Amino acid sequence: MRPQIELPEVSRLAEQSATLSRGALVSAASPRLRGKSRRHLRSLGNTLRPVVHIGHHGLTEGLADAVWDALQQHELVKIKVLETCPESIGTVALWLHLVTGSQVPQWLGRTLLVYRPFDEKPQIRLPEA
């Protein structure tokens, strides 16, 4: 069950994401990951299919719960942001980072790769920096 936290204000995140480049957004949404770790996670994410799709409802509490549940099952999750989503991809990446406590090592087109290690016995071992 996802811990009850106050959802961040989407308009504030949209303003913040509009001022950053794509690379800066990925860095802001994954502050604990460095280059080698990010590359390793991207290579693991190549074969994954999107588990969560974000559509016209946008960023809701139900979406936060769905992503949280997916991250409880898998440490690495691919998320597809559909064209009908009212928020920008950068806003979605920052929102997911803040709401789920996850890292976003990749943003490719309209697809995000989201990583959060398991609390007990992480399965994905990141390379040393």
Image (cartoon, helix red, strand yellow):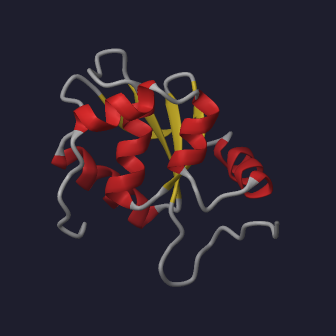
Identify the residue at horizontal 76%, vertical 48% (top origin). Answer: 39
Judging depth in this view, the residue of 49 and 43 nearest the camera is 43
Q: Where is residue 34 in the image (x, y as percent from the top left)?
A: 72, 56
Q: Where is residue 81 in the image (x, y as percent from the top left)?
A: 40, 28
Left or right of 65? Residue 74 is right
Could one spot residue 105 in this view of the protein?
no
Q: In this view, does 22 lie above or below 8?
A: above
- Quadrant hosting residue 69: bottom left
Left or right of 41? Residue 51 is left
Left or right of 98? Residue 66 is left
Q: Where is residue 12 in the image (x, y as percent from the top left)?
A: 27, 36
Identify the residue at horizontal 24%, vertical 48% (top origin). Answer: 8
Could one spot residue 80 in this view of the protein?
yes
Image quarter (top left, top right, bottom left or bottom right) of the C terminus: bottom right
Q: Is residue 23 above or below residue 77?
A: above
Q: Position of residue 54 (x, y in %)?
A: 32, 32
Identify the residue at horizontal 38%, vertical 47% (top origin). Answer: 96
Judging depth in this view, the residue of 93 and 115 nearest the camera is 93
Judging depth in this view, the residue of 94 and 114 nearest the camera is 94
Image quarter (top left, top right, bottom left or bottom right) of the N terminus: bottom left
Identify the residue at horizontal 73%, vertical 58% (top origin). Answer: 37
